Image: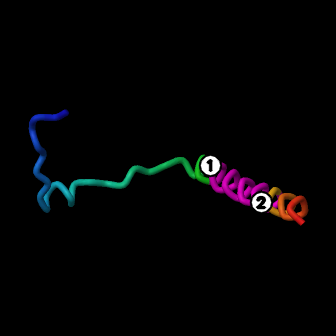
Amino acid sequence: MCAKAIVRNSKNRKRKKLAIGNPFEDLKLAINTIGSLMRATAIKKDMNKLNV
């Protein structure tokens, strides 16, 4: 663990910048997320058929 605590003040907060990501990677992540949700919905429908 770090023995020295870092005190954040208003100057440190102002200096912080958001990391700029790769838009292509963000798009891939969004597509994979949507695909996972669609697969989960399809599996749920199949499981409901088996439970009847």
Q: Position of residue 41 (x, y in %)?
A: 78, 62
| Amino acid type at mark 2 | Met
Look at the picture and state if 19 lies above or below 3: below
Range shown magenta: 27-42
Q: Position of residue 1 (x, y in %)?
A: 19, 33
What residue sits 66% from the left and 55% below the top?
A: 33
Name the one closer to the observer, 45 or 23: 45
Q: Main secondary structure of the magenta part?
A: helix
How many other residues sit within 10 Å of disc 2, few (<14), some (14-19) or many (≥20)?
Answer: few
Q: Which residue is mark 2?
A: 38
Could you tell me which secondary element the residue under label 2 belongs to? Answer: helix
Q: Position of residue 38 (x, y in %)?
A: 77, 60
Name the one closer to the observer, 20 or 8: 8
Magenta span contains residue 31: yes
| Amino acid type at mark 1 | Phe
Looking at marks 1 and 2 on the same chain, the residue that comes earlier in the sequence is marked by 1
Magenta span contains residue 15: no
Q: Is residue 5 left or right of residue 27?
A: left
- Place residue 13 in its image quadrant: bottom left
Question: In the rendered view of the protein, which quadrant contains the C terminus?
Answer: bottom right
Q: Please name which of the two marks, 1 or 2, marks the residue nearer to the observer.
A: 2
Give the label on residue 24, or none: 1
